[in-house]
Amino acid sequence: MFSGEWFSTLLQFLILVPGALSCYLPVKNRMRFSERKTFALCCSAAVLFSFAAASAVTVWGVSPNTVGIPILAVSFFLYLRTVRLDFPRALAIYVGVCAIETFPVQFGIIADMYFKSETEGMTLQGCAVLLGSSCLMLAAFIRPARKRFSKAAEEFDMPKIWYSTAVISAIFLVFNVLAAPASYNVVRGSRLRFLYPMFEVCALALLITVYVLFYSIVMSVAERVKLENRSRQLEMQASRFRELQEYMKQTERLRHDFKHSVHILAHLAEKGDLDGVRSHLDEYGQRLDEHACVSYCANSALNALFGYYHDIAESSGIKTDWRIELPEPLTVSELDMAALFGNIMENAIYACAALPEGQRYFSLTSEIRHGNSLYIVSTNSFDGKVLKSADGNYRSTKHGGQGTGLSSIAAAAEKYGGSSRFGSSGSEFYTDVVLKV
């Protein structure tokens, strides 16, 4: 069984090892297991598949392509199980690596033409060139894949572009498979002897150029999306500021109008019109109830923001349970805190609105622990429908894209050395935020 033919076939299929490792280079932050465990799993599977394929080809006479296609399909399934990627990104990376790995095969065939005349089975020298060039390409791509392309895989979330990249890679892959010569003698006896190697080198250069252009386009689009998200966050902060101004204007008008009420009450008291005094006090008390300004914290701007959203919650039939504790004086940016709490409250109120009025509730607690950590816990009812990307992040139920409100909350927590966590259980959605104050 372990003949020279079997050993050369094994070398030919061992290209699966550098190919498997190449698939994980761009997803260093998206692996489900540690790098060491992933390395052990993918290498073990690749070696096992290589031994099985070599045995199938030499013992049962199965063609390498017939064995290779099922191995690639099973390998892709295993790849999906070991990375936290959506299908388009995983497919594009996997097919791209497969397309790249067809070039070492071609280089092995080119080298093999100088050692034998038949096309059936490769020599040990040709297989060594095949495996060696694959390892050299892996070494050459380690740094750009981990530093550059991993960033693209991490930040770029446009399935159509990833599918398009997979199609382009598949074209190169299929073309290289079909380009393998049916007869070495035909190639050696014509100008193809020189054109074939040159064509393969040019095709490889073209594919690498396509990937570099793809990376450049992806990163420019990702940067634009970042700027748009930042712009939306600034707009949201400006909106919070306008809401604060409007709420404070309302309370200012009430304070301004109070002096007129004092004059009226004084005039009625001088006349001895107690019924008029009672009537005016009742009317003024009713108006105060409508615009009651509950004190949530010492900061007037944030207090107005809490009052504004509390009014919206009450008018929407949402049962609220809020307990707010903030550092006094405020040790972080007032605008950042307004954006943080504003996004939490806006998201919760929007989610509650999807339920019947009797099922709406919103609990919000913030408290200082350990002297310098602000813990914020928000729990609200919602309809139980969530949208998630493959990496587990929540997507907006308004437009299906990345949730700007949640990303703004996470950015605020990260800015102050903290963390954020979002989750759901049944009909409850919770937001946990910790930041240093």
Image: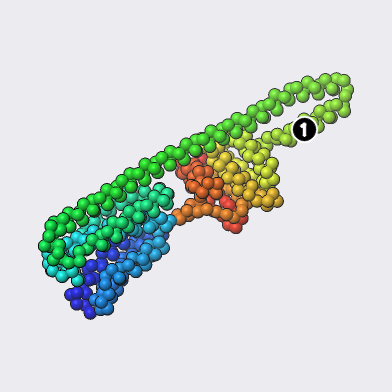
* In-image side of 157 versus 273 (left or right): left
Identify the residue shown where x is 72% and y is 24%.
257
Q: Position of residue 108 (x, y in %)?
A: 19, 63
Identify the residue shown where x is 53% and y is 33%.
238
Amino acid type of the residue tagged 1 in the rendering: Gly
The residue closer to the viewer here, 283 or 185, is 185
Residue 122: name its quadrant. bottom left
Query: Can residue 116 be seen?
Result: yes
In the rendered view, tell whether residue 329 sits above or below residue 39.
Answer: above
Q: Position of residue 214 (x, y in %)?
A: 33, 47
* In-image side of 63 versus 229 (left or right): left
Residue highlighted by disc 1: 285
Give the position of the N terminus as an image quadrant: bottom left
The residue closer to the viewer here, 426 or 331, is 426
* In-image side of 172 versus 260 (left or right): left
Q: Position of residue 212 (x, y in %)?
A: 29, 47
Q: How many marks are shown on the rendered structure?
A: 1
Identify the residue shown where x is 26% and y is 64%.
15
In the rendered view, tell whether residue 232 sits above or below residue 41.
Answer: above
Give the secondary structure at mark 1: helix
Q: Position of residue 66 (x, y in %)?
A: 30, 70
Identify the residue shown where x is 20% and y is 59%.
133
Residue 81: name its quadrant. bottom left
* In-image side of 88 versus 299 (left or right): left
